[in-house]
Amino acid sequence: MVTVPTLSPANARLVLDADAFGGLLAELDARPGADVALDTEADSFHHYFEKVCLLQLAWDGTAYLVDPLQPLDIAALLARLAPRRLLMHGADYDLRLLFRGYGFRATSLFDTMFAAQLLGEKEIGLAALLAARVGVTLDKAHQRADWSERPLTQPLVAYAAADVLHLAALVESITRDLEAKGRLAWHAEECARLAAAVFPSGREADPERDWRIKGTNALTDKERAFARALWEARDARARSLDRPAFRVLTNERLLLAAKPAAAGERDLGKLFPGPRALPDAFAHALREALARAAALAPAEWPKPRRGERVEPDPALDREVENLRKSRDAKAASLGLDPGVLASKAILTAAAKTRREKGRMTADLLVTEGGLSRWRAELLAS
C-alpha cells in the first residue's frame, strides 16, 4: 500500500542552483529504472512565447521542483528521465512542451487521465481523481499563476508539489481497477503510442489561417479585411511585449471594432472604448492597420473560410453510421464514453478500410487505418 505523503517543507525541495541540481542527479543515478512522477508548469496565460517554467518530479514521497529558468543543465536531467517509466496526468501537453523546448522524448509512461477514461470515470481531472481515490484535496487556486515570476512563493511551491506527490498512489489505485477490468493492456498500448508520437518542433505561421478567430466567417468580406489588419497589429504588439494576445486586445473587442471600421470609423476612442486610452505605439500601429485595410480593393478582401470541400459519399456515410451504432452499443456494454472507444475519424478510417479491402479485420484496421490494436479488435469483432 502506497503511503500518501502530507505536504510540508520537508517533502518539497526546491532545486534552484548547481549544488541542489547535482544532488538531484545523484539521487536519480542511485535509483536506476525507478518510476518518477512528472509534471510541468508553463506561462502561456501570461506570455506570448510559452516556455517551461518549472519541472516537478516526485518519488518516495518527496517532490523536487526544478527551476529551468536558472542556469541548470536540464538536458542532463531529461536524459536521466527518458529511460524511466514516467507517471503523468494528461501527458500529451507536457510531452509536447518538453519536446519543443528540449527535444525530450519519453520511452515509457503511465497516463492517469487516459486510465480514468478507460475505466469510464465521469470526472477525469487530477483533482477529482485524487479526491475520489486517494482522499486528497488539491487547492487549484493557482492554476493561472505566472510561473515565470521569481521567487516562487510558498503557496506556489505547495501547489506544484501536490500535483506530483500523489501520482504514485493514484497509479496504484487505478492500476488495480484496470487489471480487474482486463484493460491494462489497452492502457499500455495507448501510452506506448503517445510516447512514440512525433510532435512538431514548433507551430509554423499560416498567414491565411492564423488571423481567422471565431466569428470572422460571420463578417462581410470588407469587415473581414479590417479584422485581419487589426489582428496583425495586435499579434505584432503581443510578440513585442511577450504577452498573450488576449491581454493586448480581446477577440471580442477586435471583432466589434472591425464592423464600424469597415463602415469608415477611424476614431480609436469609438472603435475601442474603455476607461483608458490605448498606448501611443499601439494606437499608431492600429491606425496604420486601418489604413492598409481601407486601401485594399474589393478583390483583395478575404473570403470566408469554409474548410475543404468534401464530395458527398452517401454509401460511406451509411457505413460510418452503422459503425457508430455498433460502437455506441459496445461502449455502453463496457461502460465507456463512445468517443474513448472510437472517434468519428476512427470510424471513418474503419469504414474506408472495409470498403477498400472488402472486409474489416483487426489486422487491417491496425495496418491500414492506423488504429490501436485494442480498438481495432473491438470494432472488428
Image (cartoon, rainbow, N blue to C red):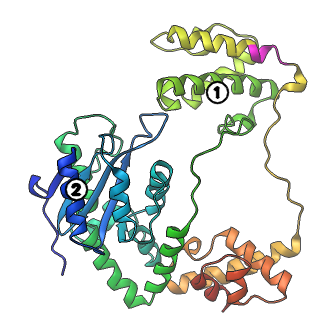
Please determine whether, in this image, residue 155 is positioned above or below residue 354. Answer: above
Q: Classify residue 132 by image quadrant.
A: bottom left
Q: Is residue 341 left or right of residue 181?
A: right
Q: Please provide the residue range marked out in magenta.
A: 292-296
Please determine whether, in this image, residue 327 is positioned above or below residue 308. Answer: below
Q: Residues within 10 Å of mark 1 (few under 14, many from 20)?
A: many
- Measure the alpha-carbon separation of dots 2 and 1: 41 Å
Pick the quarter of the image with the C terminus: bottom right
Where residue 64 appears, x then y in whole percent? 22, 56
SS state under label 2: strand
Tell me, yes or no, if residue 137 can be seen here: no
Residue annotated with mark 1: 231
Where residue 265 appears, x then y in whole percent? 70, 10
Residue shown at 38%/64% (left/top)?
A: 89
Look at the magenta stretch and give its main secondary structure: helix
Q: Which mark is residue 64?
A: 2
SS state under label 1: helix
Residue 239 in the magenta stretch? The answer is no
Please determine whether, in this image, residue 26 is positioned above or below residue 292. Answer: below
Q: Residues within 10 Å of mark 2 (few under 14, many from 20)?
A: many
Residue shown at 36%/41% (left/top)?
A: 144
Pick the quarter of the image with the N terminus: bottom left
Where residue 21 appears, x then y in whole percent? 23, 52
Residue shown at 16%/54% (left/top)?
A: 12
Where residue 121 appears, x then y in whole percent? 41, 73
Q: Earlier in the sequence, mark 2 or mark 1?
A: 2
Tell me, yes or no, if residue 256 can be seen here: yes
Give, as a three-letter code, the residue at label 2. Answer: Tyr
Give, as a three-letter code, the residue at label 1. Answer: Trp
